[in-house]
């Protein structure tokens, strides 16, 4: 899969306590992205925030709450992102999904012969 | 509040040790965003970085420094972001603020009837 | 250095276990960005993800794997980013690099007289 060139990034903002069919929603979203063959996904924990639910969440070292912000970033070609977005609709009960245009400069799977770009 | 559609993201890069009126600056910025009715804010801790101050910060597990990078991401409609930015001017003594155009695809507060988008 | 105005952000997605000349690749990339005089760099750890290697990585509190996702975000003027990107080519054996257009609204080094922007 060659994805270098124009692409789209998706950022999904949900809560750490959100679940989908008994599993953490962030994990379910990463697995969906994997199953759909998306080029990549990364989950990052926030330490404070608010959003669609309009609450301020916070944590301190060694005091981890159950509902801190979680961000999932997914990247692929624009047409693949467009096909992927409707699949999120049912899973995001509370939260925000945004997209923006990016340029994939390097996408490399570890084969040294990949470096012609 | 309906914010789906064209929007702007703000990313604020400051240090973990920055304060504003006796309170951590990151928390003060999230509270300001909340008070101004912004659609969402998320604070993320970095583990290494440099920026306007031009120093390299780093941490290792269980060795947390006081001045690691902190990123606050805020999203809302373009005109609301434009009104919000001047309020940051006084609070950011050292650091960087950048914005970029995004598209809000889903913004949902937990009401199932919200899913027509 | 005045970088307010149109700029480009770079996001580099690699693994926590990637190394470059015996040093963690994330640290090597931050040092390169510093040496090249880039305006800022921030390293963030993810808690789950997959990418060019197409594996799902995960962690739980106090159980830290060696190959979790790491994101390095770097920002500067477009022409400086264009000059910087080729330097990444050799260092990124596996992973993804993307760029997008941003606007630097505030870039401040702590000198109060900097606030004319």
Image (spheres, coloured by chain):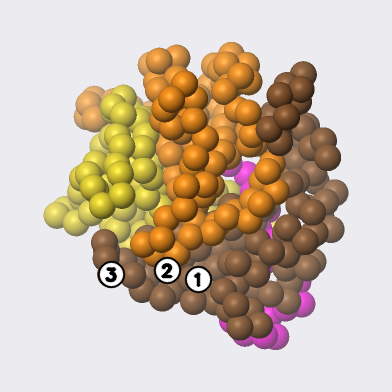
Chain colours: A brown, B yellow, C orange
- Chain containing mark 2: A
Label 3: state its secondary structure: loop
Judging by the rendered image, the residue that carries numbered circle 1 is A15
Q: Give the range drawn in magenta.
A: B97-117
Q: Residue B14, located in which quarter of the rendered image?
A: top left
Q: Which of A43 and B79 is in front in this view?
A: A43
Compute the Cα span from label 1 to label 3: 16 Å
Image coords of residue C117 (percent x, y):
38, 29
Circle 2 residue: A68
- State the quadrant of the N terminus of chain C: top left
For label 3, the residue is: A63
Q: Are marks 1 and 2 in contact (CB under 8 Å)?
A: yes
Q: Earlier in the sequence, mark 3 or mark 2?
A: 3
Q: Name the residue nearer the viewer: C15 or C34.
A: C15
Q: Residue at x 63, y 36 (%)?
A: C95
Which one is in front, B6 or A68?
Answer: A68
B103 w.r.t. C9: above or below? below
Crowding at mark 2 (Cα within 10 Å: few <14, some 14-19, many 20+): many
User: Is the residue at mark 1 from the same chain as the one at mark 2?
Assistant: yes
Numbered label tally:
3
Circle nearer the viewer, 1 or 3: 3
Q: What element carries label 1?
A: strand
Residue C46 position in % (x across, y down): 50, 52
């Amino acid at each position: 899969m060659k994805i270098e060139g124009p692409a789209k990034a998706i950022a999904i903002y949900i809560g750490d306590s959100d679940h989908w069919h008994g599993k953490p929603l962030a994990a379910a979203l990463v697995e969906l992205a994997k199953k759909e063959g998306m080029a990549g996904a990364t989950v990052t924990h926030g330490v404070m925030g608010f959003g669609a639910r309009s609450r301020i969440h916070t944590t301190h070292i060694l005091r981890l709450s159950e509902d801190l912000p979680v961000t999932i970033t997914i990247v692929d070609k624009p047409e693949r992102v467009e096909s992927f977005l409707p699949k999120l609709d049912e899973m995001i009960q509370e939260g925000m999904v945004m997209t923006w245009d990016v340029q994939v400069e390097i996408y490399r799977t570890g084969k040294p012969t990949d470096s012609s770009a």
